[in-house]
Amino acid sequence: MRKPNPNEIAQVITVYADDKKGLVAQLLMLFNRRDYPIASLNVAHTDINEVVLITLEVAIPATELEPMLHRIEKIIEVYKAKAYPTAEMPLSKIGIYRVARERLEPSFWRVLQKHGATLSGMGESSFLVQKTGTDHDLAELYESLEGPYLLAFCKSTLMAPETIVAI
């Protein structure tokens, strides 16, 4: 496992580009070559035909940020790349928690209400809880649900209003 570098700062990097095969692989190769850890990756279509918004959450040294943005913009399909420090923007993510059905009791409903979470699906032996918020918000709910009844957890990629810019 890679040790964290104290010179690295968490950044959200947004890339507007043509929707071409292999583009995400090219971007990942730029970060992997330098061993910069990617915490989150999202690719979404935009309202502009054939243009996608690629959002990465990555730890990168401050001195390498501008050169990396320049390398990204040199990729033929890329129109624009921009970075935002994660410390300066609230990053909303969606947490999904699979919980055993036995957990359905009055105290459970109080936990959901306290954390602003919702029940989003029911199965035979479990159900899904959904929460939107920051990593901290999702971790707080996780701690409240942690135990034998919490069967699984995952969180989505990030999206922040600041990342939607004109190209």
Image (cartoon, rainbow, N blue to C red):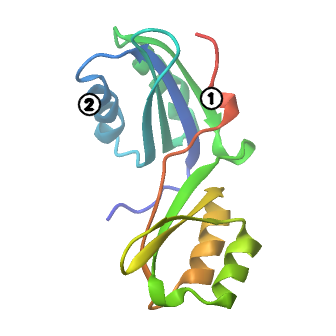
Does residue 35 sit above or below 74 in this rendering?
below
Element at label 1: helix
Residue positioned most to the left:
22
Expressed as whole percent of the image width and height from the top left, the position of residue 71 reads: 41, 19
Q: Amino acid at mark 1?
A: Thr
Q: Quadrant of residue 160?
A: top right
Task: Point out which mark residue 25 bears.
Answer: 2
Relative to 48, residue 92 above or below:
below
Q: Report the Cα–Cα distance between label 2 and label 1.
A: 21 Å
Which image quarter: residue 133? bottom right
The amino acid sitting under disc 2 is Ala
Q: Position of residue 159 (x, y in %)?
A: 59, 39
In the picture shown, does residue 61 fall above or below 122? above
Residue nearer the viewer, 122 or 20: 122
Q: Earlier in the sequence, mark 2 or mark 1?
A: 2
Query: SS for tag 2?
Result: helix
Mark 1 nearby-residue class (10 Å; few <14, some 14–19, many ≥20): some
Relative horizontal placement of residue 160, taking residue 47 as reference (left or right): right
**Which one is in front, 88 or 8?**
88
Left or right: residue 11 compared with residue 15: right
Residue, disc 1:
163
Q: Residue at x 28, y 26 (%)?
A: 26
